[in-house]
C-alpha cells in the first residue's frame, strides 16, 4: 500500500495556496497526499507585533510539533518565517523555486511621498528602511493575513502599506495601485518556500528531492547564513538578497537601526563555486564595521 504523505500547513489563504502547490506537484509525480491545516500562534495573536512576542519561528513551531509528534509527514513554510536553526529531528527537504522576492507598496496615490504620510507594516525591516528613505513619515503596525491587511488599509486613513509581492501575486489579488520597491532589500529567503520533514523519514526526504530548486537553495542559504551570523530573526531590521549571474553569486545585505537612521550594508560578489561560506563572511564584515554595537543597541531597545 502506497504511503499517503500528510502535508502540514498553516490555514491562512496564502499558506494553503503554497501547500496546495506542493500537493499538486507531488500528485503529478504519482504520490498520494493529504492536506492537514493547523493554526499557528502567529495567526492567533493578531493584536501584537511579531517582534514584541520575543521569539522567532512563531509561524512554524506549531507545525514543528505536529511533525515531531507524527501528526503530519512534511510541512510547507514561507521560508522567511523559518528560524535559521531548525529544531532537533527536523531537516530541510526541499526549497521551491523562488517567486518575486521584492517588497511592494500598495497605496492610495503617491502624492504623500515627499510630504508627511502614514505607512503600515508589521515588519521592523520594512519600517527601518522606509524611515531611512522617508524620515518625515509615520509607520504604524499592521498584522493579519494578506486579505485582512488589504482591508485594514482600505478602512483606515493610512496612505499605503507594504507587502511581499509574492503573496499578492500567488493569490492573484495584486491591486492596481501598487509599486514595486526596487530599493528595499527584502527579508532573507523572501519569496521562497521551504519543505521540511523528519530527519529519520528517508521516504519523504528522498521524495522531496525532485521538488528542490538548486539555484534558490544556494541563494537562500547565503541569505540565511548572513541572518544567522548577525543573530537576527524577527527582532532586528535585517535584509539580504543573493542572486546568481552566470558563474557569480551577487549579494546585498543590510542592517539598520530601529529608526532607520543608521545603516550598515555590504554589496559584493563571489564565484559561485566559492559561495558556501559567503553569507557568514558578509555578516562578519557588517559586524566589524559597527554592526556588533548596533545589534547590541537593538537588543537593549527591544527588551525595554
Image: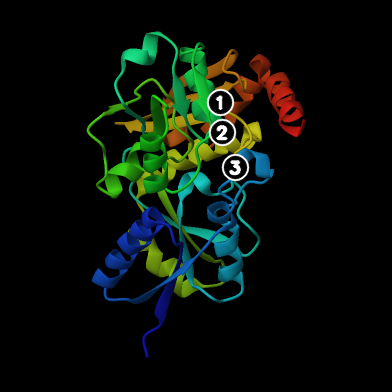
Which quadrant would the N terminus be assigned to in this image? bottom left
* Chain-order first, disc 3 or disc 2: 3
Residue 180 position in % (x across, y down): 31, 27
Which quadrant would the C terminus be assigned to in this image? top right
In the rendered image, the vertical position of residue 94 relative to residue 244, given as above or below: below
In the rendered image, the vertical position of residue 223 relative to residue 67, given as above or below: above
**How far separated are the C-alphas under marks 1 and 2?**
7 Å
* Chain-order first, disc 3 or disc 1: 3
Instruction: Report the residue that reaches farthest toward the bottom.
Output: 1
Name the secondary structure under disc 2.
helix
Name the secondary structure under disc 1.
helix
Label 3 crowd (10 A; few <14 / some 14-19 / many >=20): many
Residue at 49% in and 42% down: 221
Residue at label 3? 50
**Residue 266 visible (yes or no):** no
Q: Nearer the viewer, mark 3 or mark 2?
A: 3
Question: Is 32 positioned to the left or the right of 189 in the image?
Answer: left
Residue 144 position in % (x across, y down): 47, 47
Residue 113 position in % (x across, y down): 37, 14
**How far separated are the C-alphas under marks 3 and 2?**
21 Å
In the rendered image, the vertical position of residue 238 relative to residue 209, given as above or below: above
**How far separated are the C-alphas under marks 3 and 1?**
26 Å
In the rendered image, the vertical position of residue 282 relative to residue 133, given as above or below: below
Q: Is disc 1 in contact with disc 2, using a CB cutoff of under 8 Å?
A: yes
**Residue 49 visible (yes or no):** yes
Name the secondary structure under disc 3.
helix
* Chain-order first, disc 1 or disc 2: 2
Q: Quadrant of residue 206?
A: bottom left
Which mark identifies residue 226? Answer: 2
Q: Is disc 3 in contact with disc 1, using a CB cutoff of under 8 Å?
A: no
Which mark identifies residue 282? Answer: 1
Amino acid at each position: 500500500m502506497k504511503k499517503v504523505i500528510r502535508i502540514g500547513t498553516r490555514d491562512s489563504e496564502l499558506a494553503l495556496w503554497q501547500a496546495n502547490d506542493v500537493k499538486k506537484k507531488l500528485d503529478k509525480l504519482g504520490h498520494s497526499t493529504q492536506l492537514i491545516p493547523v493554526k499557528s500562534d502567529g495567526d492567533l495573536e493578531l493584536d501584537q507585533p511579531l517582534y514584541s512576542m520575543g521569539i522567532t519561528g512563531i509561524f512554524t513551531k506549531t507545525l514543528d510539533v505536529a511533525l515531531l509528534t507524527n501528526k503530519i509527514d512534511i510541512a510547507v513554510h514561507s521560508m522567511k518565517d523559518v528560524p535559521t536553526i531548525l529544531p532537533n529531528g527536523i531537516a530541510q527537504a526541499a526549497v521551491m523555486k523562488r517567486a518575486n522576492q521584492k517588497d511592494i507598496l500598495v497605496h492610495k496615490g503617491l502624492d504623500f511621498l515627499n510630504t508627511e504620510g502614514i505607512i503600515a507594516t508589521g515588519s521592523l525591516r520594512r519600517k527601518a528602511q522606509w524611515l531611512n528613505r522617508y524620515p518625515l513619515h509615520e509607520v504604524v503596525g499592521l498584522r493579519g493575513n494578506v486579505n485582512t491587511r488589504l482591508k485594514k488599509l482600505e478602512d483606515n486613513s493610512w496612505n499605503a502599506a507594504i507587502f511581499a509581492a509574492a503573496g499578492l501575486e500567488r493569490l492573484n489579488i495584486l491591486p492596481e495601485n501598487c509599486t514595486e520597491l526596487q530599493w528595499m532589500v527584502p527579508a532573507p529567503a523572501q519569496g521562497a518556500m521551504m519543505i521540511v520533514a523528519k530527519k529519520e523519514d528517508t521516504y519523504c526526504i528522498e521524495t522531496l528531492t525532485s521538488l528542490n530548486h538548486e539555484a534558490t537553495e544556494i541563494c537562500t542559504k547565503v541569505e540565511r547564513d548572513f541572518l544567522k551570523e548577525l543573530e537576527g530573526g524577527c527582532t532586528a531590521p535585517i535584509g539580504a538578497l543573493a542572486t546568481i549571474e552566470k558563474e557569480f553569486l551577487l549579494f546585498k545585505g543590510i542592517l539598520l537601526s530601529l529608526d532607520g537612521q543608521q545603516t550598515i550594508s555590504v554589496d559584493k560578489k563571489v564565484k559561485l563555486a566559492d559561495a558556501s561560506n559567503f553569507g557568514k563572511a558578509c555578516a562578519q564584515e557588517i559586524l566589524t564595521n559597527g554592526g556588533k554595537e548596533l545589534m547590541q543597541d537593538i537588543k537593549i531597545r527591544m527588551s525595554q
